[in-house]
Amino acid sequence: MQDKSKSFSIKNWSDDDKPREKLVQKGRSVLSDAELIAILIGSGSRAESAVELSKRILATVDNNLNELGRLSIKQLMTFKGIGEAKAVSITAALEIGRRRREEDAAKIDKIGSSQDVYHLLQPLLGDLEHEEFWILFLNNSNKVLHKAQLSKGGITGTLVDVRLVMKQTLEIGAVAIILAHNHPSGTLSPSAADKQITQKIKTASETLDVKVLDHLIITQKSYYSFADEKIL
């Protein structure tokens, strides 16, 4: 009688089905997320292959790699077959991916659309479990002179000092600013408080002849632009 535990081993698969061999022979783009994670963890358990284990892990985060990246080492270790070493490997790989996005974002130095703002700030704000408020300071060519975190708060919200915004704007010599904050809940709709602080900063900026070009609400997957929605 065939040993069932052996049938789960990737070693017994054909080369076309083995993730490592598949990557070498056909390239990285043909591998599924589960297959890539299976390469990281190397092996599964007696009950399931590394690929099946990876699929099970991904299913718990709706197959969203960004959500997977938010899991802690301890949370990953709750899956049978994932010890500390495998959990560390997954976490390290996803952190490399996040830093890669950050490097790509750093290349954006001129704002031409709300999408540029999103690509610039999503790597910084998209995965956070608390709310942060950021500002981009621009010159008259919409080149980013500076970006700064203005405040950091709990998951329910954050406080913004309008006077500090104006002070930094004058010190940097910006002629325009773009506001941005994240919603850890994933909700894209602006709250009454979001609209209120936007209007307060806009009113204060007008007295200094500074334009508020936009205010973005950023989540893991998308964003909301006050300017695009014509409520600025």
Image (cartoon, helix red, strand yellow):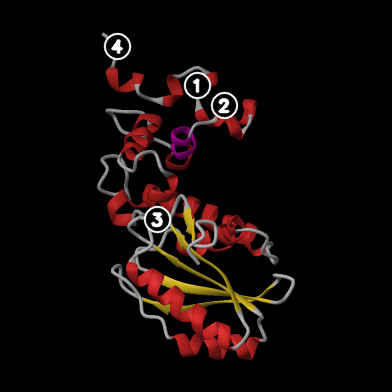
Which mark is on residue 188?
Answer: 3
The disc, 4 or 1, on the residue closer to the chain's N-terminal end is 4
Which residue lies at the image location 43% right of the left edge and 34% below the top edge? 34
Q: Residues under labels 4 and 3: Cα distance?
A: 54 Å
Residue 171 image-quadrant placement: bottom right
Kind of element beneath mark 2: helix
The disc, 1 or 2, on the residue closer to the chain's N-terminal end is 1
Mark 3 residue type: Leu
Magenta region: which residues? 33-38
Q: Residues under labels 4 and 2: Cα distance?
A: 26 Å
Which residue lies at the image location 70% right of the left edge and 65% below the top edge? 110
Kind of element beneath mark 1: helix
| Residue 29 falls left or right of residue 126 | right
| Residue 111 falls left or right of residue 31 | right
Magenta residues, dominant SS class: helix
- Residue 10 in the image: x percent, y percent? 43, 25
**Residue 188 inside the magenta-drawn segment:** no
